[in-house]
Amino acid sequence: MGIAQTTILPPRAARPIIVRESLARLTEAVGNARVTTVCAPAGSGKTTAMLYWADEFRKAGRPVLWLAARAGISDMRSFLLALEAAGVAAGLGWKGAGAGVRQDDWLAAFAGSGDARPVLVIDDAQTLSQDILDFLTQLIASARDSLTTIIASRGTSQIPIARMRALGFLVEVGYADLCWSAKEATELVHRTVGHPLDAGDLQHILVDTEGWVAGIVLASDLYKREKEKDARAVVRPTGLRHEFAEFFHEEIFNHQVTDVRNFLVDTSILEELTPSACAAVTGSDEARAMLDRVFAAGLFLNATDRERSRYSYYKMFRDMVLGRLMDRAPARAAELHRRASRHFADTDQPLDALEHAKLSRDQAFLAEQLDRLAVGLTYSGYLYRVDELGSELPWKLMSNRPMLLLALAWRRIRTLAFSSAEKLIEAARLCLESGVEDGSYDSHDADRLGNMIRHRRIMLEAGRDNMAAVEQAAEALLADLGDDDAYLSCTLLAQLMAARRELYHFHDMLKLEAETRKALGRPGSQFASIALKASVAPTLMAQGKTEFARQFLDESLELAQSIQGEGSGLAALPALPLAELLYECGDLEKAGMLVERYLPAVRQWGFVDQLASGYLVRARLAAARGELQSALSGLQEAHLVAIECGLDRLRAFVVAEQVRILVKNGQLEEAEAAFAAGDPRIDGEPVPSFNPTRRNESIAVAWLRLEMQRHRLSRARKVAMRWLEFVKHSGATRSAVTFELLLAEIAVLKGNRSEARRAVRTAVEMAEPAGWTRVFIDEGEVIASLMTEAYANGPTLETPADRFAATLVSAMRGGPAIETEEDDEDYGLSSRLAAREIDILVMVSGGLRNREIGDRLGLTEGTVKWYMQQIYDKLGVRRRPQAVIRARQLGLLP
C-alpha cells in the first residue's frame, strides 16, 4: 500500500512568506544542531518557520526530507514508507527500502549518510504513536551529527531532549520565538488587507491577537471583508467572533476528552491559573496534573513563571471558552466565580476575591464578601475599590453589614461627603446594638466594632476640621485601643498630631513621644523613635529650633536606613522633613537629592507632613531654577493627592504655594483661579479665629498676596497684623517671619519704605537663630531691595543678625541660588522681567498713565502700581523715566 503524496511534500504557502529576522538568525543554529524542537499552539507559524529553514537548507545543498504526520502517518509501517518516499524525493536513492527494511538498517543508513547531512523535518509530531517516537529518539542518537532533525508539535516536546540540551546539540523554538513583533505584524496586516490601516484599527488587531500569526491573518481577512461591505464598520477581533471560535473548536476543543474540556471551561474564569485556584474552582484534587496535561498538549496555556506554577490562557482562546460558558451556562459560571472568590479570600488575595464576587452577578454574595474583606482592603490602601463596588449595592443588602458600612463611611469622609458618612456610621452603630442584643457579638467583637465606630466619628470630625474635638476624642480612643489595632492607632495619632500642630499647641513633647511609641506598637524604643523624631521635628522647625530638629532628623534617618535601607518608605518619614529643613536653610543640593530619592516612596506611609514637605520642596526647587511649569505641574500633582486622600492641610499648603509662585511671576488671574480651586472656604477677612489652624494660616497668606495685588492694602495690613500677633504669641516663629515679610511688602506698596525696612529687620532677627534664608529669597525683588537698603548701605555691625543679613544680601544680589545650564539672557537685571511687566513698560514708554494702562490690560490701578514696583526693583531704578531708559539700554524696549 502506498502513501499520500501530501505526507512527504511541504505544504504550499497561501501567501508569500515574510522573512522574519528572528527566524533568519536561527537558521545557522538550527542547521548545526542535531535536534530542533518547535513547540507552540495551533496557528503559531510552526510550519511556516520550518518551510523557511527547509528552503534555506536546500539552497545550501542539503537533502531535506519532509514528513507531515497528520497527512497520512498512522503507524510504524506508514511512517517508514513515508520516510523512504521522502528520501527518494530528496535524491538519497532509497527506493525499495520501505517498511521491509529493518529499523536497525534505517539507523545505519542515516548514520552513514556522510557529508550529505540530510535534514529530517517532521510536522505535527503530536499525532505520532509512541513506537514511532521511540524510533525517532534512537535515530537521532545513532545518527549524531550526520542528521539534523526538526520536530514541530503543538505541545511540549514528544521526544526526550534533556541530554541534547545538556550537550548543547539542541535548539528550542517556543511560542515566544514564533510570536510576531509589532513591526512584523503590521507588515503582514498591510499585505493581507492590501493597504495601510487606520492607526486605531491596526492597534486593535495587534493588541487582540498578541502576535499569534493565525489570529493576525484571520483578523486581517475579517477586517478586509467587513470594510469592503461598509467602510464605516467598526471591526474588533475577539474570541467571540465565529471565525475565531470555529478555529478554536475545530483545531482544539473538539479533539479533547470530556475531563479536559470541563477543565478548560471551568478554569476559563481565572486570569491566572495556579494549582490551588484550579482545585478550588473545579473541586478536583487533580488540578496540578491536569494543568501539566493541558500545557503539554499545547492548548493555548502559557507558563508565566519558570517553575511552571502559574499559567494563563491565550486571550482570544479564553474569550471564546468563557464567552460560551457565560452564554450557555450562566448559573454554572456564577457558581465558579463564587468558588474562586472564596478561594482568593481564604488565601489573602482580596482584590481577586472581590473581582470574582462581582463577576458572579450575585449581589448578596458580593455584599457578604465586601463585609468580610472591607477591613483588610482598607488597611492595605484599597478603600476606593470597596467604595466602587459597595456603592452599587441596594441599601437592604448593606444595612446589616457593619464592616462594609464603616469602610464606605471612611471613604465618604475622605471625599468630604459628611452627611452620607454620618448615615453610614449610624447604621453601623445600629448593627452593633442589634448584635449585642441577640448575642451575635461576644464582648471582644463588640468592643472591636465599637472602637471602629468611634474611630470613624473622630475621622468625621477631622474631615469637618473640628480639631478641638479631634484632639480630645483621639487621645481617649488611643488609650482604649492600646496595641490592638495598628492601623486605627496610626491614623488616630496622625490626626492627633495634626490637631495639635493645627491648633498651635506646641507643648508636651514627652507625652507626644509616649503616644507615638504606643501607636506604633513595636517592641523596643529604637524603631518607635524614628516616627517620634520625624513627627516632633516639624514642630521644632516651626518654633525655630532648627538645630535640635536637624539632630532628630539625622538620627532618625540613619536608623531608618539601617533597618530598611535607603529609599525605603520608612526612611522617607525623616528624609522629607529634613529636605524641607535643608531647603529653608539654603542647602538646595542636598534637599533636592532627598526629595528625588524619597518622594516616590512617601505614600507607603502617607503622612501629611511628609507629603507636604516633599511636594512643596520639589516645587520650590523647580521655581528657583526658573522652571515655572515644572513647579506648577508638581503642585498640581500634590493638589490631586490632597484631594484623593482628603488632606485639607496639604491642599491649603499647596494652594498657598501656587499663589505665591504665580503672583511672583505676574500671573494674577491664574493665581486667583488657583486660590479658588483650593476651596478656601472663607467668609470675609481670614483673621485668626478663636481656634485658628495652620490651614487657616496658609489660606490667609494666599489671600494676603492676592489682596496686595488688588491694592487693598489697609485690609491686607490689618489681617497680616492680626496673624503676626497670634503666631508670635503661640511661639510659631517660622510663621511670624512670613507675616513680617508680607507686612514689609504691604508697606512698600503704601509708600512707607521705612516701615518696610523695620519689618525686614525684625524678620531677619527672628530667622537668624534658625538659619532660614530661602523665605527671604523666595519672596522676590521687593524683599531683596529692602534687604539691600537696610543692610548694604552704612556700617556693618558685628551682630549675628547683621552677619546673617549680609549673607542674605550677597545671596540675593550675587547670583542665582541654583546653578542652571542656561545663560542669563537678561544680563544686567537682578532677575528676568515677566511678559506682563514688558507690556506695561511698553505702555509707560508711550506716555500712558497707570489708570490708562490698567484699562488696556484689564488690571486695577493698584495692580499696575504693584507691577511698576517690581519693575523698579528689577531694573534698579526708582522713577518711570529711569525705568524706560534702563530698559532700552538692556535692549528690552526699541
Image (tube, rainbow, N blue to C red):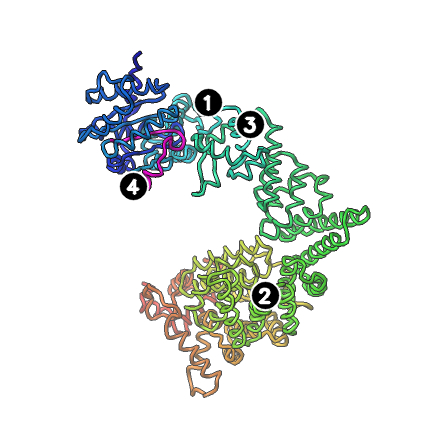
Q: Is residue 437 left or right of residue 57?
A: right
Residue 836 occupies quadrant: bottom left
Residue 230 occupies quadrant: top left
Asked if the residue at tag 2 contacts the one at tag 4, i.e. Cβ–Cβ closer than 8 Å, the answer is no
How many neighbours does mark 2 have within 10 angstroms: few (below 14), some (14-19), or many (20 or more)?
many
Please tell me the numbered disc located at residue 273: none
Circle nearer the N terminus (4, 1): 4
Q: Is residue 165 magenta?
A: yes
Q: Which residue bears the numbered disc 1?
A: 255
Question: SS class of the residue under badge 2?
Answer: helix
Q: Which residue bears the numbered disc 3?
A: 325
Instruction: Give the image location of residue 770, x and y in percent.
Output: 51, 77
Question: SS class of the residue under badge 4?
Answer: loop
| C-alpha gap between disc 4 and disc 1 | 35 Å
Asked if the residue at tag 1 contacts the one at tag 4, i.e. Cβ–Cβ closer than 8 Å, the answer is no
Instruction: Give the residue type at disc 4.
Output: Gly
Please indicate, yes or no, whether residue 712 appears anywhere in the rendered image.
Answer: no
Q: Which residues are magenta?
A: 147-167
Q: Which residue bears the numbered disc 4?
A: 168
Eye-nearest disc, 4 or 3: 4
Circle nearer the N terminus (3, 1): 1
Q: Is residue 42 left or right of residue 168?
A: right
Asked if the residue at tag 2 contacts the one at tag 3, i.e. Cβ–Cβ closer than 8 Å, the answer is no
Circle nearer the N terminus (4, 3): 4
Instruction: Give the image location of residue 798, x and y in percent.
Output: 45, 88
Question: SS class of the residue under badge 1?
Answer: helix
